[in-house]
Amino acid sequence: MAGHGWYRRFGKRALDLALTIPSLTVLSLPFALISLAIKLDSRGPVFFHQERIGRGGTAFTPLKFRTMQQASRRGEIDPLVKDDPRITRVGRRLRDWGLDELPQLWNVLKGDMSLVGPRPTLRYQVERYDERQRRRLLVKPGITGWALIHGRNTLTWHERIELDLWYVDHGSLWVDLRILLRTLVVVLRRDGLYGPDGVNDMFVEPPHEDCA
């Protein structure tokens, strides 16, 4: 992290705003069309809301397009599988191309997230971090990150955390630009959408009381 303090303090936020503001402007019409498609495809709200833990352990709610049936109260607490029947028809297309994550640009604009950083995680996962893994919370969570371009959901959670810790120590302007460019390739190729055997690793079993 040493040597990149200027970027962490000033440049990273400037880059977020410089890319996020025009992106939201350009995406306003596509967002409206996606919202309409979601409403026509299945019952329920356009957006999915679920608490995540961000920098310093602070809770926030990232914005995502809803991709699953409203009746599935357990939502993303259950392990997601490749042919999960809870995923809607429109939702599957959104997930395939990573479009469900784009509303998180609003979270970047608000300052809850950055374009690049560790993916935001659930409270039960953070509660299972050891002291070293908690260093993952030293930076803002991101829409994309070092772990995403190095395997995405094909990685175990422990592997993802190790890659995120590398980013905490080595993140810089050039690393962020590399991640952003590489993300386009990963998304277009639809790499790593699901884990081994089509099941995504949830980082130990979630507590049952959270899944009621």
Image (cartoon, grey):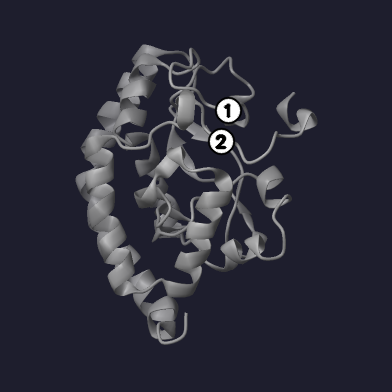
Q: Quadrant of the C terminus?
A: top right
Instruction: Please give left or right for residue 71 compared with residue 7 in the image.
Output: right
**Element type where label 1 sits in the image:** loop
Mark nearest the camera among 2 and 1 is 2
Q: Residues within 10 Å of mark 2 (few under 14, many from 20)?
A: some
Mark 1 is on which residue type? Pro
Q: Give residue 79's mark.
A: 1
Residue appearing at x 32%, y 65% in the figure: 176
Q: Give residue 201's mark.
A: 2
| Labels 2 and 1: the sequence-earlier one | 1
Q: Residue 57 location, x and y as percent?
A: 66, 60
**For residue 62, above or below residue 137:** above
Mark 2 is on which residue type? Asp
Report the number of numbered marks: 2
User: 162 or 118, which lies in front?
Assistant: 162
User: 95 or 129, which lies in front?
Assistant: 129
**Element type where label 2 sits in the image:** loop
Q: Give residue 166's mark.
A: none
Residue appearing at x 41%, y 71% in the figure: 171
The CA distance from mark 2 to mark 1 is 7 Å
Circles 2 and 1: CB atoms closer than 8 Å: yes
Q: Say if residue 212 shows up in the picture.
A: yes
**For residue 38, above or below residue 116:** above
Instruction: Please give left or right for residue 166 compared with residue 25 in the image.
Output: right
**For residue 108, above or below residue 85:** below
Q: Residue 29 location, x and y as percent?
A: 22, 36
* Quarter holding residue 7: bottom left
Q: Residue 56 location, x and y as percent?
A: 63, 65
User: 203 or 56, which lies in front?
Assistant: 203
Q: Say if residue 24 shows up in the picture.
A: no
